[in-house]
Amino acid sequence: MKLFSLGIDISKATFNVALLLDNDKLRHKVFTNNLTGFQQLSAWLLKHKAPNVHACMEATGTYGEALATYLHQAGHQVSVLNPVIIKGFAISQMSRSKTDKSDATLMARYCEQNHPPAWTPLAPEISELQALVRRLEALLEMLQQERNRLSAGVNSVTVKENIQEHIDYLKEQIEQTQKFIQEHIDQYPRLKEQRDLLTSIPGIGETTAARFLAEIIDINNYDSARKVAAFAGLIPRHEESGTSVKSKARLSKVGNGRLRKAFYFPAIVAKRYNPIIKEQSQRLEKRGKCAMVIIGAAMRKLIHLAYGVLKTGKPFDPLYGKTA
């Protein structure tokens, strides 16, 4: 059965759709971003004789999750795209306008031409873990902001006391959320086993392990450690053109920023306490590499080690791969 391409530009309150029919005909409509709007979309698709669609939308945090899940459960194919992909496609199409309607049209045409991979909803235990981990991240950011305000100097005694009270409250919330994460992982044998494998690696603690598991979703989706590193944006990016342009390699940073951020401080710790990464860092330092290059390499190596323990099901072994 033919799948018609449906582009969806979603926002908090509404979503704009573009349905690509036969003979390149387009139909547009705006719906409210709630169950009523989802049901109206289903009726609208049937009205245009498009009972089965391949829907494409950008990853926009939580705004599109309910609609994506609804369409998936209704039997439609759904793809959730990195916004960078659609931006690049818009440039390739020489798109000169930027509206909700034009964005939905772009996604419909991208879907028609490229047939991106299908999206499936997260397993309930991963969805809950992801929500808890991201809440912890938000609390840690708020705590750092308040600490920065306090260290910057506050003239008002009342304001200073208020900030300190908020800091104390945030610390309690952070401790409670960390406990929730630990208890949640302990409920699921597979998550618990993976958490224990990850924390066997010097440099990776329970918080980093939880962040890693929440963002990669399923390690079996990756057939190499390099692909996990690429997903985190930790693969070097080279810029060369002819003989005149040849810049130093830098981290691509095209990938999951949360995962990349989660491994920054662990990499600094691993440089001192993880024997494999310590040796690598010393070798790079002798070659004259700068501190940030060494940290980037340590982050990437940690990702490789994490992939290794999860794929093999064996704890970290500092002597792995070395001959006696």
Image (cartoon, rainbow, N blue to C red):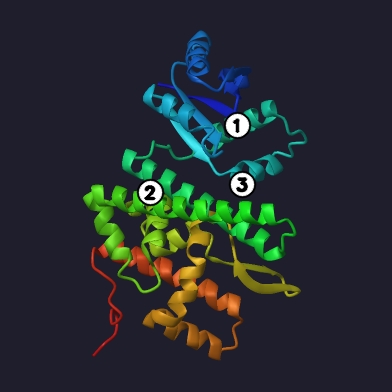
What element does badge 2 sit on?
Answer: loop
Label whose residue precedes the other's in the sequence (1 or 2):
1
Identify the residue at horizontal 51%, vertical 8% (top origin).
47
- Residue 92 x, y percent position in the rendering: 69, 43
Camera-near label (3 vs 1) is: 3
State the image quarter where residue 77 is shown.
top left
Mark 3 lies on residue? 84
Camera-near label (2 vs 3) is: 2
What element does badge 1 sit on?
Answer: helix
Answer whether residue 115 is visible to the viewer in this image. no
Spatial distance from mark 2 to mark 3, Cα to Cα? 21 Å
The quarter in which the C terminus is drawn is bottom left
Q: Is residue 193 above or below residue 274?
A: above
Label whose residue precedes the other's in the sequence (2 or 3):
3
Q: Is residue 204 left or right of residue 315?
A: right
Taking depth in this image into account, of 135 and 253 the one nearest to the observer is: 135
User: What's the residue type where badge 1 is placed?
Assistant: Arg
Do callouts 2 and 3 mark residues in contact (Cβ within 8 Å)?
no
Mark 1 lies on residue? 109
State the image quarter where residue 323 is shown.
bottom left
- Residue 252 x, y percent position in the rendering: 59, 62
CA neighbours of label 2 inside 10 A, class few (<14), some (14 to 19), many (20+): some
Spatial distance from mark 1 to mark 2, Cα to Cα? 28 Å
User: What's the residue type where badge 3 is placed?
Assistant: Val
Label whose residue precedes the other's in the sequence (3 or 1):
3
Answer whether residue 200 is visible to the viewer in this image. yes
CA neighbours of label 1 inside 10 A, class few (<14), some (14 to 19), many (20+): many
Q: In the displayed image of the protein, which residue is found farthest to the front?
A: 157
Identify the residue at horizontal 51%, vertical 74% (top origin).
297
- Residue 207 x, y percent position in the rendering: 40, 59
Do callouts 3 and 1 mark residues in contact (Cβ within 8 Å)?
no
